[in-house]
Structures are given as C-alpha cells and as structure tokens.
Amino acid sequence: MDEVQLRFPLITGSVVGQPNTGPILVEKARVGKSIALDLAKLGDTSDRLAAPLLPQFEQAGLSVQPRSARFARLGTFAYRPTGESLGGGALRDEAGKGLVLAYFDAPCRVTGTLRIGPVEASHDLTITHRGFHWLTVDEIGKDRYSVRNRPPPGSVTFVIILPEPADRRT
C-alpha cells in the first residue's frame, strides 16, 4: 500500500465524538511522504460549519464561556484509493504525543470534565483568538484523559490506526 486518501471531516460543537459533517478536505498521500494542509482554506469552511457546544456535551460536564463561541475539531480518517476504509487516523507530535487540531470562532474558555460511560476527559482550554489551535490529549489513568492547549508542534505525523484483525479479538 503506497498511496492513501486522507479525509478530514469536522466534529462540530465538541472536541470529542464522531464527525457530523462530510469531509471538508480530501488529500492523496504517499505512505512516508509529507503533505501540506491549507489551514486558511480549512479555516473558512470550519468557520461556516462550527457550532456552539452541543447540549449532550454540556449535560455530560463541559462548559464554554462565552456560550456563543462556536468551534469544531478536525477529524482524521484514512482510506485506500478505492474508497475502502483503512481505519481512523491520529495526529502525533515529534515525541509521539496525541494532537487535536480545533477551530474556534472567538476567544473562549472550555472547562469541565466530560463523562461518557467509563471515560472521563478533563478539559482546561484557554482560546485567545479566532482560528486553529493545537490541543493535546494526555492519558492520565485508565479511561481518564486531560485535554489542554499546547504550542504549535515542530512537525505533525498522521498515524493510521488499523482495526484489529477479527482472529485476534477476544
């Protein structure tokens, strides 16, 4: 497998969860080679589609101030050139830490602990300006995560997370 198709949908009104838009960008890439993403173009589309915090995430423990702030996280998925899904994707910094790229339409604060089933994700984000922001998601315990701001990374790697083969599942 030399060529893959990277699809970037949005998760609007949250920095976690499943995409609720189609891909806003599709890039052909060669395994092991670099690509550049046009964040200005992505920003225009993200601004149009961003949404305030979704009610189910507010009920699950998150807060955004001001409440009118709209945001969207960039989703990451990988496909074969034929369109067959390879699995989810993840962004990693040069040290291998997980990254999230999220768009915010205004300065805001995102705080609280999101609880979904056994998973808890503590958020403490300070957004200082409109545009894209890099976030890090650190595992701090079993099913416990911390979502924080981080400076722009020196380089970003798109990692394809292949599904576990059926014969290895228990």
Image (spheres, rainbow, N blue to C red):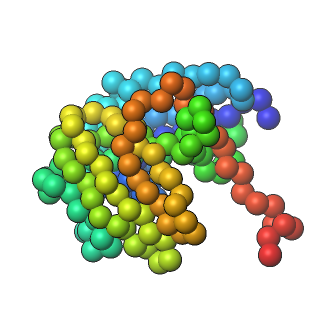
Q: Residue 53: where, in percent of width, then height?
A: 25, 59
Q: Which of 136 and 71 is in front in this view?
A: 136
Q: Residue 16: where, in percent of width, then height?
A: 42, 57
**Residue beneath the point at 21% across and 34% down:** 129
Q: Residue 66: where, in percent of width, then height?
A: 13, 53
Left or right of 74, for residue 128? left
Q: Which of 159 and 121 is in front in this view?
A: 121
Residue 103 vertical position relative to residue 65 in the rendered view, above or below:
above
**Residue beneath the point at 55% across and 35% down:** 93
Q: Farthest residue in the right direction? A: 167
Q: Nearer the viewer, residue 118 or 9?
A: 118
- Residue 65 visible (yes or no): yes
Query: Which image quarter holds the C terminus?
Result: bottom right
Left or right of 144, for residue 82? right
**Residue beneath the point at 79% across and 35% down:** 1
**Residue beneath the point at 43% across and 57% down:** 146
Q: Farthest residue in the front direction? A: 140
Q: Residue 3: where, in percent of width, then height?
A: 72, 30
Residue 123 vertical position relative to residue 44 in the rendered view, above or below:
below
Left or right of 1, for residue 37? left
